[in-house]
Structure formats: structure tokens, C-alpha cells
Amino acid sequence: MESYLQIEKLTKSYGDRILFEDLTLGVFQGDKIGIIAPNGAGKTTFLNIIAGKEDYDSGNVVFRNGIRVGYLEQLPPMDSDMSVLEYTASGATEEDQWTGPDLARQLLYQFRITDVDAPLRQLSGGQAKRVALAKVLMGKPDMLILDEPTNHLDIWMIEWLENYLTRQKTTLLMVTHDRYFLDNVCNRIIEIDRGQAYSYQGNYDYYLQKREERMENMSAELAKVKNLLRTEREWMRRQPQARGSKAKYRIDNFHQLEEKSRVDLRSRDVALNVKSSYIGSKIFEARDVKKSFGDKKILNGWSYDFARYEKVGIVGDNGAGKSTFIKLLLGELQPDSGSFDIGETVRWGYYSQEGMTGFDERKKVIDAVREIAEVVRIDDKTTLTASAFLSQFLFTPQTQQKYIAKLSGGERRRLYLATVLMRNPNFLILDEPTNDLDIMTLAVLEDYLVNFKGCVIVVSHDRFFLDRIVDHLFVFKGDGEVRDFPGDYSTYRHCVAEEEKERKEQERLIKEAEERKKGNTPETVTGSASRRQTPAKVKLSFKEKKEKEELEKLLPELEKEKSELETRMSSGEMSPQEIVEAGEKMSQLIDKIDEGEMRLLELMEKEEGNA
């Protein structure tokens, strides 16, 4: 395998805090690597260093000469004065400068960005991420570096990207918390743990198995070190102050063992043990709720009785009304007609995207929490001080004294989650809770929600999270339609795929029946001609007969080729350049089919007319 990137003895620190030290790894052609580490371990810093956007203390980062590298940042910087098309086309390679706008337009349409002349400042978070991804792909990179690529994307776009990365030969290095994405795309996992990199040749599921083995081996090795250290410590205590030179090696070895014994292999996970407050049998009742914004319908006569301990996932395209629905439920918006009747015991806990901006960044972590409560009730018998409660969310006494402005994205998420749960809600509404949370914290949050003695509504693009948590789905299909699907997301996705397959088959059968009724299909005409076998009917010249036979053979082949190309173009498996080429090919095929059908009809009419 050809080396694309070599990282040797990379060290990076902030003050006295070391993110990684003497970290060494190689990336080879064809690698599809997922990077896993806890929040605050420096994943984004690591990618920024590789992409040349951040400096490091020591070591070497060397790319192979001549390879094109594309970097999708977690929050891509965008010039708000540029149009979507200009911004995307600016990512084209030098060879594609002339065709850049056309290529960009094709790619943006593929990503469902239709208003390509809109300024960047008007884009939603999901649209901005898709546009940034389109710009990166315009550069036809040999190697992609992706920082949380699934954040803010709709599920359909995540599945498109997953399919694309799986099929393409592009070498990949990415940070993501999406476990299905890791499992389906990656062939190698790198875990950054205690400043070192550990490589696993396999997908995420394989990594989990091998990591457990590694931790067991490390625990056994640590136990041996500690046993030997006890023996050596006794020897050190027994020796006189003036030791001979022969003992120097043993003394040095003792100090090395002492250093090794300080390794802490305990897993530091968030402790979510806050109990919900009591919730009664009446939760909320929705009666014929309608809500629109101009011509855009969000809810069109929606009714529902929410039951105790229900856990619902909400899915749908951006703009379908998911956020509006939540605001209606919380009373932040009023319906145009209909009503919500909320039970008296319901105590909301709302984790939202907007809530992250509510922190005063000039305050310290501990002060922000103490403003809410000095003491937190865990259950009927247990309370914790604000500081002790924060420690369960992995905020050490030192971190609690940090200003909020200095926290990483993941640390802010954990702090926000702590402030939501410390109020003991019994009805949790979680709007995209998985963004920026590390996999370890997500697993703990999932366990907490599965056992939560209250109600839960989750808006999420994380398919694994939805499959683990929810009993059923509210599917926002647009134009005010909300489908209640009994089951998790994977079951729903399978059913949709089967429904789509059946719909296409029905359309095909109907189309064939209509064409037969019109008598316009070559097969029908040929069949009729062969059945009647009237010599007077065949009055075409030899050349025309030959042409007709060739068209009758060619047109079905062209239709088949067109159908196969349509399937490929909608699969997400094609590169940007292939999409443009396929679009041109499709245009040529349609022209050929139209011309062929017109000519065949002319020949058939002439033949019929001479009968």
C-alpha cells in the first residue's frame, strides 16, 4: 500500500495540559479511518494540525507529494457575501475551472440545494454543511479529512454520504460519533487514549471487541507491575543509604516501575443517575391541531394522546416542521386552530440547539451551575452539591474553574446536558442531542434514556441512537402530514424501501398497460404484425424495413440503459465528475429515444397506411 500521510512523534499541549505526546501513525491509500476519543482529548485539534490550520509543539506531519487533500471542518467558515454557486465552484481543480459552475450546480442539485444564487448567510446549518461538503468534493480529493461530517445533516443526506464514501476509492480520515456510519464506512479505527494512538484494522464493531481485549491485557500488565513494585519497594526500604554501583540499575528500574504504575485505566464516563420527578397518567392531548406559515403547512388537523413513559423519535427533512412542532408543544408558539392540553404533573426538560447559546461565556462553569441550584436532588434520599454534581459529568475541580468561553464543543454539550437534568424533568425533549457528544457519553445517555421513568421525544439524525431509544416515530412528510410509525428507524427505513420498490413496479405496470392500449410499443406493433401476417401490409422499402427492425431492437436497449443510469444517479455512488458526465449521457439518451420513437412511429404509420 502506498503511504499518503506519515505522522511521527507528534506532540501538542496547551499550557501544562498535554493532548498527545510522541503520537505516531501512518495513513495509506485506501484507508478509511475513523478517529475515536473522549470529548476534550483533542480530536478537532488533531485534524486541524494535519490540515495545516494549527501549529504543534514537536514532531512531523508529512503528506505524499502531489496528493490532493480535502478538509471539511466541523463549522466551515463561509463568506456571507458569496452566492452558494460561487462558493461551491471555487473548490474546483485548475483543470475544471471552465466547467466548475456546471459541475457545482449538478452537485448542489444532487444535495437538494436548488437556490444556487442565494447568499451563504441565508443557509440553515444543514444546508451550510451540504454546501461545504459540495465545495470539498469539487476538488476531487485523493484524501478526505472530515470533522463530524454527519452533524446537522438530514438522515437521507447521511445515507447518501455513507454510500458515496463506501463506494469511492478516496482515502478517508474522519472524526464522527455516528456508530452506523463508522461501522458501514470504516475499515480502520484509531483510538486516541491518554495521549497515544491505538490502531484497529476493522470497522467499529471489530474495534469494540479488540479494545476490550486491549484493556484486559493492560489491566493484567498493570497488576504485574504493581506486584513487582511492592517487592522492589520493600527492597528499597531494606537497603542502607550508601548503595553500591551494582544496585544502581535496580534503583533506576524501581523508579520506572513507579512511573508505569501511575497509569489510570479506569474508564471516566458521565454518571447520569438523576431521577425524574413523578409524572401522572395524563401527559398531553392534541386535538385537531393546525399550523401553517403562509402556504406552508406544518400540521394539518393533527390529533394524538401521549401515554405515560412513551419514547418517540421525530424524523423528516429540514423544513418539514420538526422544530415548530416542539415549540407548539412547549407553548412557545400557538396553533392556528385546535389545542394542546398538558397534564399538571408534566415537568419539561428541553435540550435544544438554541439552548447552547444561552450560557454567559464570561462566567466560570461552577458559577453558571450554582446560579441554577447550589444543591441537586439525585433521588428522594440523595443530594449533591453543584460541584459534586458537575464531577459526575466529568468536570474536574480544575475544569469547573474554567471560563465557559474556553470549553470545547463537547464540554459545552455536557455542561448543557447537566443543567437540563439537574432540574429533575419527567418529560425530556431532546433536539439533536448527539451533536458533539463523544461515543462514550452517548452510550451512557442512551442507557439513561432507556431506563428513564418519564416521557421522551427525540429529534435526531443518529440512526443508532433512534434505534436504541424510541418505541415509535413521528415522520414529518411535509405539507402538514405526520405519519405515526410503530417501530424504530431501521424498521421504518426498510419498510420505506419496500414501499418505494412496490410503487415503482406499479408505475411500470401502469405505463406498460397505457402504452399497449395506445398501441405505441414496438413489442405490441410487432406482435400484431406477426399475428396478422398480411403481405399487403408490408409496403416499406428494404432499407426502411431494415431501419424499423433496428429501431425495434435499439429502443428497448436505450430504455434499459436510461433506467440503469437513473438508478445510479440516485444511488449516491457517483463522484462529482461522474454525476456531470452521467447528466450529459442522460440528455443524449433522451434525445436518441425521442428521435427513435418518432421515426419508428413514422415507419409504422406508413406501413399501416399501405395495408
Image (cartoon, grey):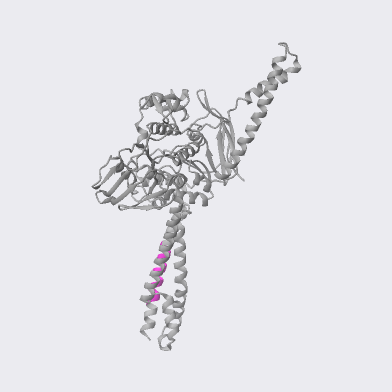
Q: Would residue 28 be visible to someone looking at this image?
A: no
Q: Would residue 377 be visible to someone looking at this image?
A: yes
Q: In the rendering, at what x and y percent does residue 606 appear?
A: 37, 81
Q: In this view, does 47 lie above or below 202?
A: above
Between 219 and 16, the one nearer to me in the picture? 219
Q: In the rendering, at what x and y percent does residue 299 appear?
A: 29, 50
Left or right, residue 356 beside residue 336: right
Residue at x 41% of width, y 79% of height: 525
Q: In which quadrant will I find the C terminus?
A: bottom left
Q: In the rendering, at what x and y percent does residue 379 appear?
A: 42, 31
Residue at x 64% of width, y 35% of height: 217
Q: In the rendering, at what x and y percent does residue 225 appear?
A: 66, 27
Region rendered in magenta: 587-601
**Does the magenta run of residues contain 598?**
yes
Q: Is the magenta stretch mostly helix, strand or loop?
A: helix
Number of marks in the rendered image = 0
Between 216 and 154, the one nearer to me in the picture? 216
Quadrant position of residue 424 = top left
**Does the magenta run of residues contain 106?**
no
Q: Is residue 236 above or below residue 502?
A: above
Between 92 and 10, the one nearer to me in the picture? 10
